[in-house]
Structure formats: C-alpha cells, structure tokens
Amino acid sequence: MFFDFLGLFTVVELTRQVLDNADAFRAGVAEIDGIRVLGDGRFHLVAVAADPAFEPEIDVFALGDALLARGWFHDRQGPPDSLHSTISNSNTGVIDDYLADLAECVAAVVGTRTDDRSTNYATLE
C-alpha cells in the first residue's frame, strides 16, 4: 500500500493555515468595539454579531452592506442577526486588510440601520 506523505503534509499545512487565519480573524474582531464573535468556535466557521453592551448598537446587516461595497461578502443569518464567514487558507495574507476594512465599516455604520432584513441562513426560526 502506497501512502502519500507529501499529500498528507499538504493537507496538514493547509489545515494549519485555515486555523491560524480563523484565530487571527476572531482575535481581530475582539479588538473592535461594537461587534463580537458568537460562540466559542475553534475552527473555520465564524459568526459576527453586534455587541449588545455597545451603544448605539451596530446593525450587522448594515455592516455587511458596507463590507460588500468594499468587496467582502458575508452570508447573513439570524437570529440573532449576524454575519457568517467561512475562513479558508485562501484568506492567508488578507486577514489584516479585512480587519482594517471591518473596523472602518463598523465606525461608518454606528447608529444606522438597513431596511433589508433578509438572510441567507437561519440559525433558529
């Protein structure tokens, strides 16, 4: 039986990149006032919602619209209203760019609300 050690190394390295990217994503979100990561995920799926302790509250769907205008797409889900991200190894090298745009977009949407309440996913309904 032939075992592909190079292929196994590639899978392990790609998985490490995905998990490192997701950790950087979650850590960056934690540094931005007004939003938070939902749950205590450790893998590559991340949901971002408004921080209920922050005033005035951030409308994450307005945030998603602002991010989309900069080229970042998120699935919208709820309840609670949140933006769903699937982090991958292809995010390597752009996490810092994304987080900079995220912080700017959060600041830009404080106190605003979009009329579009549609979602792509529903966590509970």
Image (tube, grey):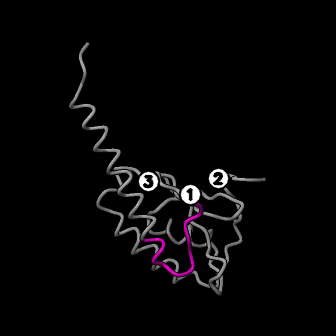
Name the element at disc 2: loop
Residue 105 spot, x, y in % from top left: 49, 77
Residue at 48 percent of width and 54 percent of height: 42
Query: Label 2 sits on what residue type?
Result: Asn
Numbered label attached to residue 84: 1
Q: Amino acid at mark 3?
A: Ile
Q: Secondary structure at mark 1?
A: strand
Q: Residue at x 67, y 57 (%)?
A: 119
Residue 83 image offset from top left, x and y in percent? 58, 62
Drawn side of residue 119 relative to residue 102, left or right: right
User: Residue placed at 62% from the left, 83% from the top?
Assistant: 54
Instruction: Relative to 78, say whether 16 is above or below.
Output: above
Q: Which residue is mark 3?
A: 87
Number of the front mark, 3 or 2 = 3
Circle 2 residues within 10 Å: few <14, some 14–19, many ≥20? few
Magenta span covers which residues? 28-39
Q: Dot 2 corresponds to which residue?
A: 120
